[in-house]
Image: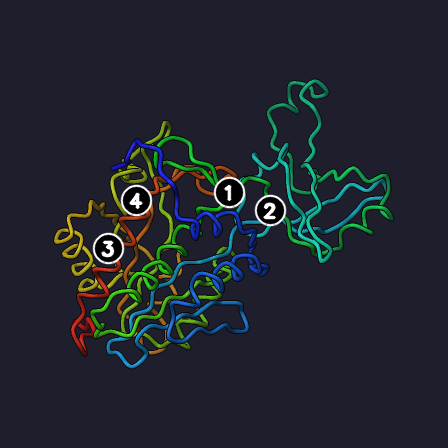
Amino acid sequence: MSTNKAIKPDKFLVDLLNARSPSGFEFEAQAVLNKYLKPAADRYEKDALGNRIATLNPKGDPIIMLAGHMDELGLMVRYVDPKGFIYFDTIGGHDLSIISGRRVCILTSKGVVKGVTGKRAVHLMDAEDRKKTPKLHEMWIDIGAKSDKEALKLVSIGDPIVYDHGFELIRGSIGAARAFDDKAGCYVVSETLRRLSKLKKKLAACLVSVATAQEEVGVRGATTSSFSVNPHIAIAVDVGHATDHPNCDPKRFGKFEMSKGPIISRGPNTNPMVFKKLTDCAKKLKIPYQIEADARPTGTDARVMQMARQGVATGLISIPLRYMHTPSEMVDLADVENAVKLLVGFVQSFKKGEHCHF
């Protein structure tokens, strides 16, 4: 449960949350991982998609891969009109109704350019206009430029953009951030390796923690890294919908609560032996958890991890999150911590050669 007391969040997590890393442009998150994760690994690699792959005990058996994606939603400069207003495309799945009126950061080769997503004021709309959500091509970004020539000295076509919303504690251990999806999961898999690297007890397993790229545009980093790592067991850690807020019917979406522990997925996308091992570990360690019934392949890295090469015994852990894909996603950091503890125990529980075949 939530501590309901002010806490000091782990600086590694805060740095990840504040890193601006829209899909395909994960540079700032990669730099954070290089700083915090690389020193803990026996082997640390990067690849052509930008994944960060950290290995502990490389000669161990089984090979366990943990994956959390480092990328986030974004926008991209598409066109600058003669008056210097910037039109944009979306990176990942946006709710168009919440884009307008936001402060944004345009990430250019020369540094960050600040701007605002513009919209015609409500005073200048008639009754019918007020009912409509603007279409993407009807929105723009205002950087205060007077012309396209001036604007294009500051930004370039194809520059990525993120909302200008950083991490903030709201109350106790509950925080809000632009990109808990999925910096929370990326932190969990990375921190699991960091903690295990400090323990004197040798692992039977080889642990590979992967910060995956480009999940928001098609689980692309997990596709390539699952193939290259070739694990026996894999766990994806992402965020899941907390349905404990108004206007969210549990009969439609299931019942999941923030501050009640990580969500463990059960269904065809997950291996039943991995599911049982996760729940057994949670019970043994007295970690609260919730179960989600996923009747189809999930919208996470787990979807492709399960199907890599000859097939992988896969599990999925989700951090309960309110207001997904908005600029102010909300998470209880106690749930994040419990996910780390669960995975530390899970990895330690494996005996040599245990592969979860059934």
Q: Quadrant of residue 120?
A: top right
User: Pointer 1 and pointer 3: residues touching (CB < 8 Å)?
Assistant: no
* Amino acid of disc 4: Asp
Residue 286 x %, y %: 15, 48
Which class describes the residues within 10 Å of circle 2: few (<14), some (14-19), or many (20+)? Answer: many
Q: Which amino acid type is marked by label 3?
A: Leu
Vertical side of 354 occupied by 248: above or below:
above
Mark with earlier residue (2, 3): 2
* Residue, disc 3: 342
Check contact, mark 1 vs mark 2: CB within 8 A.
yes
Q: Is mark 4 in CB contact (under 8 Å) with mark 1?
A: no
Residue 93: x %, y % from top left: 52, 48
Q: Type of residue at label 2? A: Val
Sequence-first disc among 1 and 3: 1
Residue with the mark numbered 1: 178
Callout 2 touching callout 3 (CB < 8 Å): no
The x, y position of residue 334, in whole percent, is 30, 42
Q: Residue at 40% x, 50% y: name it.
A: 184
Quote the CA–CA distance across marks 2 and 4.
Answer: 26 Å
Residue placed under numbered mark 4 in the picture = 335
Which SS class for mark 1?
A: loop
Q: Earlier in the sequence, mark 4 or mark 1?
A: 1
* Mark 3 crowd level (few <14, some 14–19, many ≥20, 10 Å Cα): many
Q: Which residue is mark 2?
A: 162
3D distance between C-alphas at marks 1 and 3: 25 Å
Give the CA distance from mark 1 to mark 2.
Answer: 9 Å
Which secondary structure lies at badge 3? helix
Q: Horizontal placement of 138 versus 34: left or right? A: right
- Mark 2 lies on a secondary structure that is strand
